[in-house]
């Protein structure tokens, strides 16, 4: 064929309705200097429907008559919706005649009481005929030079057990003659159907339209084949099971066949053989997104990634044959697989150890009983002599395969594969790998299949620093953190491959979940609306959602002051979920609970980060930890640990009432939601306990001497009531500050940790030249007096309150976690 050709194939989903046909027409509008062969499938569901008619008639099920009418009306409705009325009558007359022929075949089949192969082939092929006629007429209406070809006129195949054998010489001669008689720029060709050497109609079997495209591309010497479907290309895994599956730019023929064999919906391995023989590139593209480049399949593919994709086949059974008769005895394997061949059993995978004591193989679960009976019968003699010890059948298995040409000779691929499975808690029952190293296949329990597939995919396709994040408590600090994350997510991903995916946000009443990631530009609107992702808050459901197998790591950020949430830390850490929090409740719980939490955080496969529980973003906890871990002896810690109280006593000079300053601080987010948490000294007390425990002291809140600032009688009641009644005590506070001023002192609310003299929390006076007297607004300041820093204490100072700095500290903990994970992996 001297003329250049390009072959297109449109599947059933691309021809499902009138809108889909118009999308196909739009695809074919793109200009080209080559002629186009357009192979079409039947409308989605039509072939199955037609075959069902024959089977119903063969069972003498009279309901086939109603189903015939439904299918006819479906085809008529499609024609009327697509083709103008003045041009549709001829097509509709053809449909009417075809259904008359179908009814004749069905009546004959009903009389016979069984469907013949010829009846099935005849009826099943009508769907492609209707698609070809309809698309050709639609393209003609658009002004194109188009003819349509019934492939049975030119394509001759000899049906065979494995796949139909093409009579290339006869088919090429017939096609050449047909094209000479019917010249056109576009030829719409029926897929799936052909004729046998005697001229009887036959089919190319399942995926036959893809095979047709490959055959006609070879017959025409086409430059390329494009398979148009409803996805953007070949994906790295099944997107229904792996939400993070990616479109692959290119595959080699071998990679595509491996993936297809193990269940990936690419293109059937057998259908590619003519294209492979003639080295014709195959493109997989989306009819409904034609701007997407799709996936190119050719001789080789790029080597950017050693692993190209993952595929799995479920509903499998594993048979394991063991016995001494198998060791060093030639012909045992031949005998075994000969028995299976005679029984009509298809073997999917084989694995045998070098000891030869056992051999296991995988086959479809519905063939397991047949295989077991055949083997027991075939090995009956040596089984009776004890030389075959056991034949075990394990049902409910899945074969999972990892595929990539560049896996060969690349160290670490197997380690990454099995390491991901181990971290996901997936047990491997059998392993197989050929010498080409292009494929590693394993057998696992079917119940573990989705978890395993997601785990191995994320291990190879996502950054090692990809985190699934759930945030609880989007109040002052939580909301600010989300805004800070929103401004830096793209930069972190592009510059450092740190991929932070906020997938859950929860208040105390509702939560927002997203399968991929929440858009942090509009999370407030979604959380406060009837968004489908917004549902009643449920910590169990949030935990399950965040701890997904499709993302390597999960972290929950607790920005609440909730005891209930803090009580979940042990559970989360034990599940491998990292925890980051500014919530002080867990670290100040009973000493027994604290010890359990710390012990678990040390031995669990998860990190617990809580730098912001003391001093917001200031490195106070880390500084103390460094001192202790490097062997310094901490003799005394004294500090202003509350940014709230620092702000209050920096601001309170007697010119404004103390109660007014408290109210302003609360509105600015400097206090806890209930300011009594700060004024009572409990916030400072919790920080003192946290630091004391970091030093190794068994200190509890009940051991502290706390002299708080909540007036007697105001300990209970609502926040609004407290703020209203606090004005009654403004005069007393004014007297206290004026007395201190008269002595040349300032007031500071301070926590002290002294292993020898005890720990306390109280309002204390300091001389005007003391470091504590020279702090600014919300500053925290902490003095570490140690054996190393004895005469000149180590001082950490800076803003210690406010949503921005606290959120920034949590953000820093999150990046610190990502760094740990990147280094660990």
Image (spheres, helix red, strand yellow):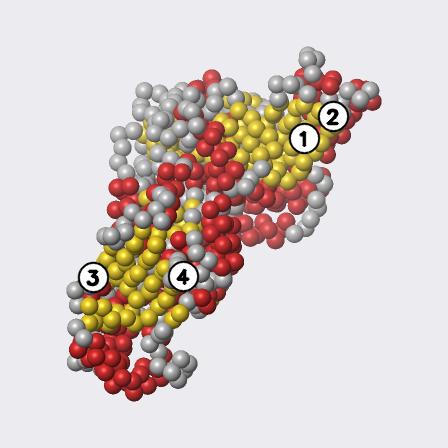
For discs 2 and 4, the disc positioned in front in the rendered view:
4
Give the labeled residue for mark 3: 771
Residue at (38, 62) in percent of width and height: 757
Which residue does the image show at 56% across and 32% down from the upper left? Answer: 442
The one of 613 and 444 positioned closer to us in this rendering: 613
Q: Quadrant of residue 464?
A: top left
Vertical placement of residue 737 versus 40, above or below:
below
Per the rendering, the mark at residue 319 is 1
Q: Nearer the viewer, residue 286 or 689?
A: 689
Q: Nearer the viewer, residue 133 or 372?
A: 372
Q: Which residue is mark 2?
A: 375
Q: CA distance from mark 2 to mark 3?
A: 87 Å
- Label 2: which secondary element: helix
User: Which of marks 4 and 2 precedes in the sequence?
Assistant: 2
Closest to the camera, between mark 1 and mark 3, is 3
Mark seen at residue 689: 4
- Residue 17 locus on image (x, y percent): 43, 49
Specify which label sits upstream in the sequence, 3 or 4: 4
**Foreground mark, 4 or 1?**
4
């Amino acid at each position: 064929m001297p003329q250049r050709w390009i072959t297109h194939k449109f599947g059933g989903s691309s021809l499902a309705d009138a809108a889909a046909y118009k999308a196909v027409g739009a695809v074919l509008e793109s200009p080209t200097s080559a002629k186009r062969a357009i192979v079409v499938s039947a409308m989605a569901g039509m072939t199955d429907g037609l075959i069902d008619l024959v089977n119903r008639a063969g069972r003498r099920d009279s309901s086939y008559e109603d189903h015939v009418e439904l299918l006819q009306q479906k085809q008529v409705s499609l024609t009327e919706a697509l083709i103008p009325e003045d041009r549709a009558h001829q097509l509709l007359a053809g449909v009417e005649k075809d259904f008359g022929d179908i009814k004749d075949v069905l009546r004959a089949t009903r009389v016979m009481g069984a469907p013949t192969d010829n009846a099935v082939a005849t009826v099943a092929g009508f769907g492609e005929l209707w698609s070809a006629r309809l698309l050709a007429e639609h393209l003609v209406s658009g002004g194109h030079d188009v003819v349509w070809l019934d492939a049975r006129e030119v394509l001759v195949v000899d049906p065979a057990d494995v796949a139909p054998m093409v009579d290339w010489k006869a088919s090429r001669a017939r096609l050449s003659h047909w094209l000479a008689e019917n010249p056109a720029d576009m030829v719409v060709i029926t897929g799936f159907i052909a004729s046998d050497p005697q001229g009887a109609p036959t089919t190319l079997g399942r995926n036959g339209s893809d095979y047709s495209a490959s055959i006609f591309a070879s017959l025409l010497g086409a430059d390329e084949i494009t398979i148009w479907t409803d996805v953007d290309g070949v994906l790295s895994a099944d997107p229904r099971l792996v939400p993070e599956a990616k479109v692959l730019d290119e595959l080699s023929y071998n990679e595509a066949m491996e993936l297809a064999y193990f269940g990936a919906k690419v293109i059937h391995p057998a259908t590619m053989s003519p294209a492979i023989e003639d080295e014709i590139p195959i493109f997989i593209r989306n009819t409904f997104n034609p701007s997407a480049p799709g996936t190119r399949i050719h001789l080789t593919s790029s080597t950017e990634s050693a692993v190209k994709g993952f595929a799995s086949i479920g509903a499998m059974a594993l048979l394991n044959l063991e016995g001494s008769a198998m060791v060093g005895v030639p012909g045992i394997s031949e005998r075994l697989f000969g028995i299976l061949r005679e029984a009509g059993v298809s073997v999917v995978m084989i694995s045998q150890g070098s000891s030869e004591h056992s051999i296991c193989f995988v086959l479809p679960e519905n063939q397991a009983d047949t295989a077991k009976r055949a083997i027991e019968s075939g090995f009956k003699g040596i089984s009776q002599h004890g030389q075959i010890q056991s034949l075990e059948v394990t049902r409910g298995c899945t074969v999972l395969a990892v595929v990539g040409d560049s896996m060969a000779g690349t160290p670490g691929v197997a380690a990454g594969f099995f390491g991901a499975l181990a971290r996901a808690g997936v047990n491997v029952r059998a392993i197989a790998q050929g010498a080409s190293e292009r494929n590693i296949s394993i057998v696992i329990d079917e119940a573990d299949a989705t978890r395993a597939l997601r785990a191995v995919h994320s291990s190879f396709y996502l950054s090692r620093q990809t985190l699934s994040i759930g945030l609880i408590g989007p109040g002052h600090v939580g909301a600010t953190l989300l805004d800070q994350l929103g401004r830096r997510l793209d930069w972190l991903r592009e510059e450092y491959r740190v991929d932070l995916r906020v997938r859950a946000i929860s208040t105390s009443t509702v939560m927002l979940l997203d399968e991929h990631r929440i858009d942090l530009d509009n999370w407030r609107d979604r959380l406060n609306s009837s968004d489908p992702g917004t549902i009643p808050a449920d910590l169990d459901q949030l935990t399950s959602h965040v701890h997904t197998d499709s993302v390597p790591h999960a972290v929950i950020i607790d920005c609440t002051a909730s005891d209930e949430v803090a009580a979940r830390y042990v559970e989360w850490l034990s599940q491998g979920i990292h925890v980051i929090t500014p919530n002080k409740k867990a670290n100040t719980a009973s000493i027994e609970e604290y010890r359990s939490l710390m012990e678990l955080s040390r031995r669990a496969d998860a990190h617990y980060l809580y730098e912001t529980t003391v001093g917001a973003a200031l490195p106070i906890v880390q500084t103390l930890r460094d001192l202790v871990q490097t062997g310094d002896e901490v003799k005394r810690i004294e500090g202003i640990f509350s940014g709230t109280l620092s702000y209050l006593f920096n601001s309170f000079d007697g010119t404004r009432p103390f109660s007014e300053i408290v109210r302003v601080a609360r509105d600015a987010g400097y206090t806890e939601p209930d300011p009594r948490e700060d004024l009572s000294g409990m916030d400072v007390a919790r920080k003192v306990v946290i630091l004391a425990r970091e030093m190794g002291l068994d200190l509890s809140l009940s051991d502290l001497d706390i002299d708080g600032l909540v007036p007697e009688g105001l300990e209970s009641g609502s926040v609004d009531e407290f703020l209203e009644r606090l004005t009654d005590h403004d005069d007393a506070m004014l007297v206290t500050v004026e007395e201190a001023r008269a002595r040349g002192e300032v007031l500071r609310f301070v926590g002290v940790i002294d292993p020898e003299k005890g720990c306390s929390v109280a309002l204390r006076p300091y001389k005007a030249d003391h470091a504590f007297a020279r702090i600014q607004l919300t500053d925290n300041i902490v003095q570490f007096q140690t054996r190393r820093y004895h005469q000149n204490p180590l001082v950490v100072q800076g803003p210690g309150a406010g949503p921005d700095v606290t959120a920034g500290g949590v953000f820093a903990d999150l990046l610190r976690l990502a760094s740990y994970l990147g280094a660990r992996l």
